[in-house]
Image (spheres, rainbow, N blue to C red):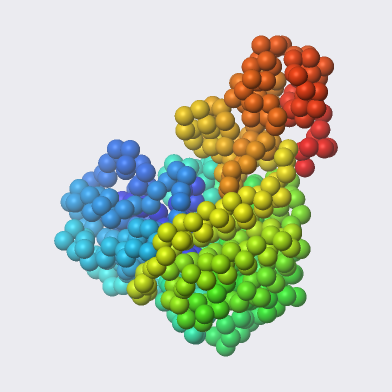
């Protein structure tokens, strides 16, 4: 038997599989196919869009599940139209899997998803539970029912399916393997947040540290160096004490230490290890244990790490109406703790471990006052001198129930206000001019601008105002700011080779002065630079970023932090 796995990407509340991420689900499916004695071929939706045809085989599995609104730099999740077109082009057995098979194809926030049964004439099977278990049964036995994988299968298939990463177009770099530690939400006992799919899994099912470590070891041996422990609703609740008895179980420090320490030992060439997702109520309820876990994250993980905190709304009426998981007091305590434990700058140039905040609009009980309450809460974080690496503002997608979304124009204006008055000053505080960022992967060009990001959780977008060869790593220095991105130049920047666009981006230079520098080349000293400028202070400021002659920038201990 031969099966093609068409990866339409996944973006769920507790899992990401949009490039450069490869989701764990895809690896499980590959492992299940191997375990059933079948051959598989892997194809991403982006490869399919570029004309890579689905080869003739016995079965096609279309996997898709982008059910949270997102913005993407390169890969774009599969649309309903593309799923239908792919299915209609294939003549064997067709399976639709992922969250889209159960919840439909989402568009943007506030809009109802396209129901999966719209594809009933084009799809033979809808794998509404675990796609890997369905594939295994179908390939092994010729028939299948929707079911969950067993714990033994969950131990076996991630290791067996690890080799699929070699077929991913981002392998070996900048590929990052998403790791799953458990499914479900510890708040399932109350139904969880009104909009979220995680409580629908029921009681959380945890993987043991040694099983996750075995998966990492298999991936590492294949050449994977970047990992994110992102597929869980709350990292701090992994194997926590009191799950099923309370919505804020006590964090299990020993289990998390075993997990992190084991991953580092299993991946000796590890370059990136990040996490994602944290319930601020758990952190606030257990500050002692949470401090210890944050310390472990700083010790074993790499800088640039982010814990996305699910506040969702600072309006207590909205929180009550939608059974949200944390109060603003909880969120503030979590923000303060993570800033205290992880706010120091790491070797990559980014802070070690910072919080992010998720906000959703369109929930039940929302009024115009909700927008002001959210803004004022974020402003209070800024005024306290605290940092948020990311503020994620979106409109609700009606997956579990319908929501009557109002105030769209207000939403747009309010979002822009937060970008201008909160994000921008916070970004300048986090990354002062001259900060050195290491290991930025150049991904794409748009006109004469080159864009790159560090690998990891919610990486900051870096724009270079000149053309650079892509698909490689460079170090760079911060020279300017967007609302949620930075402008940078290579570090060191050779004054005698840099294009005018790079020189013009330096603080205080601009195009006219850049042309003067260009015409005065070759420069042999800072005095040569000053001689072609009309302002000595500007020349000294620019010299901090430049390699002039054989001299490196004179401020590696100053401007570069």
Q: Quadrant of residue 48?
A: top left
Estimate the x, y position of residue 265 in percent, counting from the top left: 67, 56
Residue at the spot 74% in from the left edge and 63% down from the top edge:
384
The answer to whether residue 142 is seen in the rendering is no
Q: Position of residue 522 (x, y in %)?
A: 72, 11
Depth check: 168 or 500 in front?
500
Residue drawn at (34%, 63%), measured in percent from left and top? Answer: 111
In this view, 167 is above or below 191: above
Quadrant containing the C terminus is top right
The reply, left or right, for residue 90 in relation to residue 28 is: left
Residue 334 visible? The answer is yes
* Of residues 313 and 414, the one drawn nearer to the viewer in this rendering: 414
Q: Could you tell whether 217 is left or right of 526 in the image?
A: left
Residue 123 or residue 164, whichever sits in front: 123
Q: Quadrant of residue 555?
A: top right
Q: Across the whole image, how many numbered discs are drawn on residues? A: 0
Residue 171 to residue 265: above or below: above
Instruction: Please provide percent x and percent y for residue 104.
Output: 31, 64
Q: Is residue 269 left or right of residue 345?
A: left
Please identify the quadrant where the N terminus is shown.
Answer: bottom left
- Classify 328 as above or below 81: below
Q: Residue at x 70, y 12 (%)?
A: 521
Seen from the viewer's position, the closer of residues 42 and 455 is 455
Whole-percent x, y for residue 89 in the image: 20, 48
Q: In the current view of this chain or complex, which residue is farthest to the bottom? A: 245
């Amino acid at each position: 038997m031969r099966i093609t796995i068409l990866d339409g990407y996944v973006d769920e509340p507790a899992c990401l599989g949009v490039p450069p991420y490869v989701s764990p689900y895809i690896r499980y499916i590959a492992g299940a196919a191997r375990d059933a004695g079948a051959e598989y071929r892997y194809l991403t939706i982006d490869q399919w869009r570029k004309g890579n045809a689905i080869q003739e085989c016995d079965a096609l599995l279309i996997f898709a599940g982008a059910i949270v609104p997102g913005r993407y730099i390169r890969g774009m999740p599969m649309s309903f139209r593309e799923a239908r077109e792919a299915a209609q082009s294939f003549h064997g057995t067709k399976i639709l899997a992922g969250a889209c098979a159960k919840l439909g194809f989402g568009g943007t926030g506030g809009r109802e998803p396209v129901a999966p049964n719209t594809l009933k004439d084009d799809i033979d099977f809808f794998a509404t539970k675990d796609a890997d278990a369905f594939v295994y049964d179908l390939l092994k036995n010729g028939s299948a029912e929707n079911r969950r994988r067993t714990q033994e299968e969950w131990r076996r298939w991630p290791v067996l399916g690890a080799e699929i990463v070699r077929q991913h177009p981002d392998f070996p770099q900048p590929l990052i393997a998403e790791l799953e530690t458990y499914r479900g939400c510890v708040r399932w006992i109350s139904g969880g947040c009104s909009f979220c799919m995680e409580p629908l899994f029921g009681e959380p099912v945890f993987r043991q540290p040694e099983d996750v470590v075995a998966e990492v070891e298999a991936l590492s041996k294949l050449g994977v160096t970047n990992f994110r422990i992102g597929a869980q609703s709350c990292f701090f609740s992994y194997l926590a004490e009191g799950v099923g008895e309370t919505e804020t179980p006590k964090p299990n420090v020993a289990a998390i230490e075993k997990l992190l320490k084991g991953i580092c030992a299993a991946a000796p060439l590890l370059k990136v290890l990040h996490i994602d997702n944290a319930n601020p109520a758990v952190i606030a309820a257990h500050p002692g244990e949470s401090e210890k876990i944050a310390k472990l994250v700083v010790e074993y993980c790499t800088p640039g790490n982010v814990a996305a905190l699910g506040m969702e709304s600072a309006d207590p009426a909205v929180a009550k109406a939608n059974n949200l998981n944390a109060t603003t007091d909880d969120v503030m305590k979590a923000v303060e703790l993570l800033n205290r434990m992880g706010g120091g700058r790491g070797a990559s140039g980014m802070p070690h471990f910072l919080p992010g905040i998720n906000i959703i609009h369109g929930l039940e009980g929302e009024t115009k006052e909700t927008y002001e309450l959210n803004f004022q809460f974020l402003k209070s974080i800024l005024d306290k001198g605290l940092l948020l690496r990311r503020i994620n503002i979106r409109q609700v997608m009606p997956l579990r129930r319908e929501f009557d979304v109002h105030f769209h124009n207000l939403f747009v204006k309010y979002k822009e206000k937060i970008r201008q008055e909160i994000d921008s000053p916070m970004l300048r505080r986090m990354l002062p001019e001259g900060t050195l960022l290491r290991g930025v992967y150049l991904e794409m060009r748009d006109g004469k601008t080159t864009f790159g990001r560090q690998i990891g959780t919610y990486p900051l977008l870096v724009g270079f105002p000149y053309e650079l060869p892509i698909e490689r790593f460079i170090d760079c220095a911060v020279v300017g700011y967007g609302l949620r991105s930075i402008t940078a130049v290579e570090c060191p920047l050779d004054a005698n080779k840099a294009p005018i666009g790079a020189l013009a981006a330096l603080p205080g230079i601009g195009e006219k002065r850049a042309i003067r520098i260009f015409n005065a080349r070759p420069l042999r000293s800072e005095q040569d630079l000053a001689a072609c400028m009309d302002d000595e202070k500007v020349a000294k400021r620019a010299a901090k970023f430049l390699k002039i002659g054989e001299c490196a920038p004179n401020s590696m201990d100053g401007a570069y932090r």
